[in-house]
Image (spheres, rainbow, N blue to C red):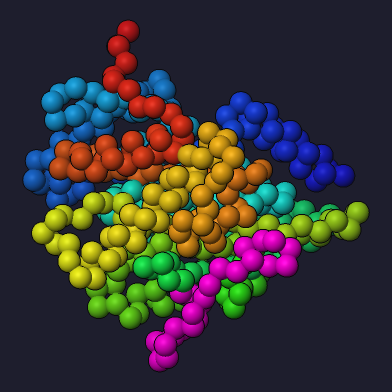
Amino acid sequence: KQYLEESSERKRLYNEVIELKGNIRVFCRCRPLNQAEMANGCASVAEFDTTQENELQILSSDSSKKHFKFDHVFKPEDGQEAVFAQTKPIVTSVLDGYNVCIFAYGQTGTGKTFTMEGTPENRGVNYRTLEELFRCSESKSHLMKFELSVSMLEVYNEKIRDLLVDNSNQPPKKLEVKQSAEGTQEVPGLVEAQVYNTDGVWDLLKKGYAVRSVGSTAANEQSSRSHCLLRVTVKGENLINGQRTRSHLWLVDLAGSERVGKVEVEGERLKESQFINKSLSALGDVISALASKTSHIPYRNSKLTHMLQNSLGGDCKTLMFVQISPSSADLGETLCSLNFASRVRGIESGPARKQA
Ligand code: ADP
């Protein structure tokens, strides 16, 4: 009974917020200046309002200031706990039967992987989410039975690769998005590994990350040019009324959004950057179409959006982290990312606000 009350209270609060703001959120996270940037004398171009948790200003090269507003802005000193505290209500709603998508978007080196994956000492959203899902499902075990499973995949040059299958000795199995008899988009053949505790999850994630870096001479290089997706499937059974739910939570570390310099662009690199551009703009188009409540949503324009179709739109919840660097050397890319995120959210960016 207590669980049902809590769950309906959570839903009520959520619906209130959705009515006010819609179910698409954009959080901005700015990483700290790194040692090399400090040694090179790069200044920080990001300014934060100490009284407003959702605004930032970027100092442009002509000394003008551009003002941006998101659902939340994380400053360089904000740690993984602070980020997860804001993310937790969104991810845990998968236990209430909602489909949820979380994306990390931004230039390579701005902290997408740090936010999602984190490090063993400083775990990111992925691990903390699973930890929280286990905690919640444990505390409700007398009322709800939950079964959690995990899939891990990569989209590189519009090809899907299963990261829970070690293909190093054979050609990778080809995976495609197919429509099921129920009309949902599925990836037949994708491994779905049931998980029982955080240790099991951590072992699985390590395996997936290891497979990801095999087959590429420059692992870091390739990982910045592919999208890495962790999918958590939650099957729930209400022990009181027998009602069953199945929902997906997608945790997505996107390919780097940077524009590639003209000189470098040829051969493989050209193909890669065209695929990345295509899929990131397709994602932006889908989210902004959903935010503006347009009737046609162009899901089919990329593998990524096609695969996520059932988890984007409707009453699904979407969160995008736009990751930025504070360095003056990255100003151009930072403005591109912030403009992209503002467009996605349907918010226009503007000149600096007048200081009171
Ligand atoms: P991306 O995935 O966007 O290419 P990474 O997550 O690899 O970027 O981050 C680049 C480097 O910056 C890493 O060494 C990472 O640990 C560090 N870093 C990123 N964000 C933060 C942060 N908020 N606090 C501390 N270090 C960070």
- As rendered, which of 129 and 191 lies closer to the eye? 191
In the picture as drawn, the residue positioned furthest to the front comes out as: 296
Q: Which residue lies furthest to the right in this view?
A: 241
In percent of width and height, residue 199 lies at 56, 70
* Quadrant in the rendering for residue 8: top right
Which residue is located at x 29 percent, y 19 percent? 352
Q: Which residue is drawn at 14% across and 30% down?
A: 61
Residue nearest the viewer, comparing 224 with 193: 224
Quadrant in the picture for residue 60: top left
Residue closest to the eye, 197 or 195: 195
Please, which residue is most extreme toward the left here? 40
Q: How many labels does the image show?
A: 0
Q: Quadrant of residue 314?
A: top right
Span of residues in magenta: 161-185
Could you say where residue 271 lies in the image, as x and y percent from the top left?
27, 66
Q: Name the residue at 43% across, 71% down.
A: 159
Q: Which SS type dominates the magenta stretch?
A: loop
Query: Can residue 201 be seen in this snapshot?
Result: no
Residue at horizontal 46 percent and vertical 35 percent from the top = 345
Give yes or no for residue 167 being in the magenta stretch: yes
Quadrant containing the N terminus is top right
Could you tell whether 89 is left or right of 110 in the image?
right
In the image: residue 115, left or right of residue 216: right
| Place of residue 13 in the rendered image (x, y in percent of width and height, measured from the top left) | 69, 32
